[in-house]
Amino acid sequence: MMHGNGHGRVHPLASSSDFSGEMNQSVSAPSSDPSSSPLYSFHFEKPVPQQPPPAQTGTYVVQVPKDKVFRVPPPENARLFEHYTRRAKRRSRCSCVRVCTCLLAATVALAVLLAAAAGVVYLVFRPRRPSYTVRALAVSGLAGVGNASAAPAAFSPGFDATVRADNPNGKIGVHYEGGRSRVSVSYDGVPLADGAWPAFYQGPRNVTVFVAKAKGSGIRFLQGVRGQMAAAELLRSVPFDVDVEVPVRLQLGGVRTWAVPGRARCTVAVDRLAADAKVVSSSCDVKVRFLSWRN
């Protein structure tokens, strides 16, 4: 409400309850024209509500320690890993197959070369099997074996075998290594004596006669074996088995081969059990491992 006086001025009421907000009063300097310049002016400001700041879009940099970073590969990485793994396995299998094939081919080639070399050697040297003959067998230490009452409980038999070795090869010599040889004599499977084969070299087309000795001790016979030996002596044909094992090396011209085991088994029958016994029959079978001989 405004009240006027007689001078034409307007004053505000003391109460300002009809106004809300903030009121600013300004008084202007008096002028000559009161109508052109009001004495009072009012300015009202309404409170503006605070708006939240708009969300800003952009790139954010977040720093995380390395030990807290866990990476999860994308699915395509797993597919690539599986693909390369399968390819590596295929390559590995191919490599193994390739290596095995090469080894097999090398082995076959080596076998073919060895077979060809052996064939050439066989055709050039024409190897023939040596022959052995027991010409005499002196027996000792078995006297009275058939007399159970007079014979001792244990025997110490001895054998001296005179052997003829015949090398029929014209281009091959034979080295006998006596250090690792063995000569054994048995009767009906019962071992009687052991000895050694002498070491010597036998040249091509050579005949060598030598003596191989064997000795035994503490030999005990069953009553049945004694009876058999006594009966065979009465028949003037006591058979003994002579087994020989001796390493041999072949001399092929200027080349000496490696040592191979040579074996011979001879069956010899004598007319009596004495030092002057005579051989009534003799046969020998010779085998040399890794070598093929012609008779």
Image (spheres, rainbow, N blue to C red):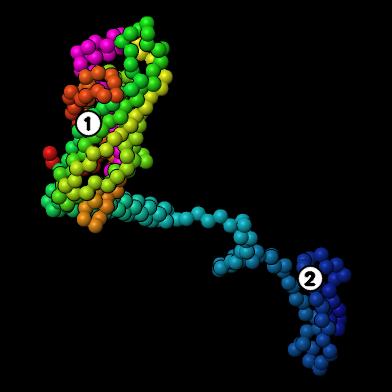
Q: Is residue 254 left or right of residue 158?
A: left
Q: Secondary structure at mark 2?
A: strand
The residue sitting at the bottom extreme is 32
Tag 2–tag 1 contact (CB < 8 Å): no
Q: What residue appears at the point 37 percent right and 8 percent down from the top-left corner?
A: 150
Mark identifier at residue 22: 2
Nearer to me, 61 or 282: 282
Q: Residue 134's mark?
A: 1
Image x and y of residue 265, in percent: 24, 30
Q: Position of residue 48 (x, y in %)?
A: 69, 67
Q: Residue at x 26, y 27 (%)?
A: 137
User: Does 232 appear in magenta?
Assistant: yes
Residue 222 lies within the magenta run: no
Vertical placement of residue 24 versus 183, above or below: below
Quarter occupied by residue 4: bottom right
Residue drawn 41% across the image and 22% down it: 217
**For residue 195, which quarter of the picture?**
top left
Instruction: Specify the amino acid type for callout 1.
Output: Val
Please name which of the two marks, 2 or 1, marks the residue nearer to the observer. 1
Q: Which residues are magenta?
A: 223-248
Q: Is residue 250 above or below residue 25?
A: above
Look at the picture and state if 266 lies above or below 179.
above
Q: Is residue 292 among the parts visible in the rendering?
A: no
x 33%, y 18%: residue: 142
Picture quadrant where residue 161 is located: top left
